Image (cartoon, rainbow, N blue to C red):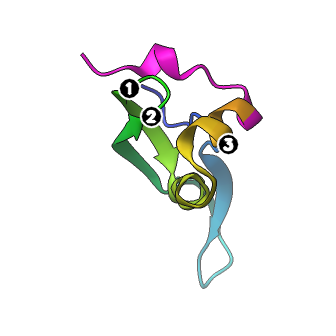
């Protein structure tokens, strides 16, 4: 799996690391991604997704199925075996 949120599409960002002497080197800023096993009520099964913590908070608020439909994600692709 790539370092990308399934729902929001958050990905690593490239930025400059600036030292005290103002030298600039490239660095990567990673989103806070968590691999979670969530219960999908409509599918009556667990799904394993890699989601950002912001997406997980929204899932807790609105529900997994509603959030997936809103973002166009097919949860059947993430069913745990």
Residue 7 seen in the current view = no
- Dots 3 and 2: beta carbons under 8 Å? no
Q: Which residue does the numbered mark 2 point to in the structure image?
A: 41
Horizontal and vertical percent position of residue 33: 46, 50
Q: Earlier in the sequence, mark 3 or mark 2?
A: 3
Instruction: Please report the residue visible at 64 percent of the width from the left and 25 percent of the height from the top.
Output: 73
Q: Is residue 81 left or right of residue 66?
A: left
Label 3 SS: loop
Label 2 SS: loop
Q: Is residue 36 left or right of residue 28?
A: left
Horizontal and vertical percent position of residue 46: 33, 30
Residue range in magenta is 70-81
Pick the front one: 53 or 67: 67
Q: Which residue does the numbered mark 1 point to in the structure image?
A: 44
Q: Which residue does the numbered mark 3 point to in the structure image?
A: 8
Instruction: Please report the residue visible at 37 percent of the width from the left and 41 percent of the height from the top.
Output: 38
Decide: few, some or many residues near mark 2? Use Cα within 10 Å; few <14, some 14-19, many ≥20: few
Mark nearer the viewer, 1 or 3: 1
Q: Is residue 78 left or right of residue 10?
A: left
Q: Is residue 75 magenta?
A: yes
Marks 1/2: CA–CA distance: 5 Å
Q: Quadrant of the C terminus?
A: top left
In the rendered view, tell whether residue 72 sits above or below residue 5: above
In the rendered view, tell whether residue 58 sits above or below residue 81: below
Decide: few, some or many residues near mark 1? Use Cα within 10 Å; few <14, some 14-19, many ≥20: few
Decide: few, some or many residues near mark 3? Use Cα within 10 Å; few <14, some 14-19, many ≥20: some
Q: Earlier in the sequence, mark 1 or mark 3?
A: 3
Horizontal and vertical percent position of residue 58: 61, 57
Pick the front one: 48 or 19: 48
Give the tally of numbered discs: 3
Instruction: Please report the residue visible at 43 percent of the width from the left and 21 percent of the height from the top.
Output: 78
Residue 27 seen in the current view = yes
């Amino acid at each position: 799996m790539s370092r990308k949120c399934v729902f929001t599409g958050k990905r690593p960002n490239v930025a400059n690391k600036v030292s005290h002497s103002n030298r600039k080197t490239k660095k990567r800023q990673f989103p806070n991604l968590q691999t979670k096993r969530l219960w999908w009520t409509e599918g009556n099964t667990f799904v394993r997704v890699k989601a950002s913590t912001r997406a997980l908070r929204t899932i807790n608020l609105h529900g997994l199925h509603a959030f997936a439909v809103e973002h166009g994600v097919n949860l059947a692709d993430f069913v745990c075996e």
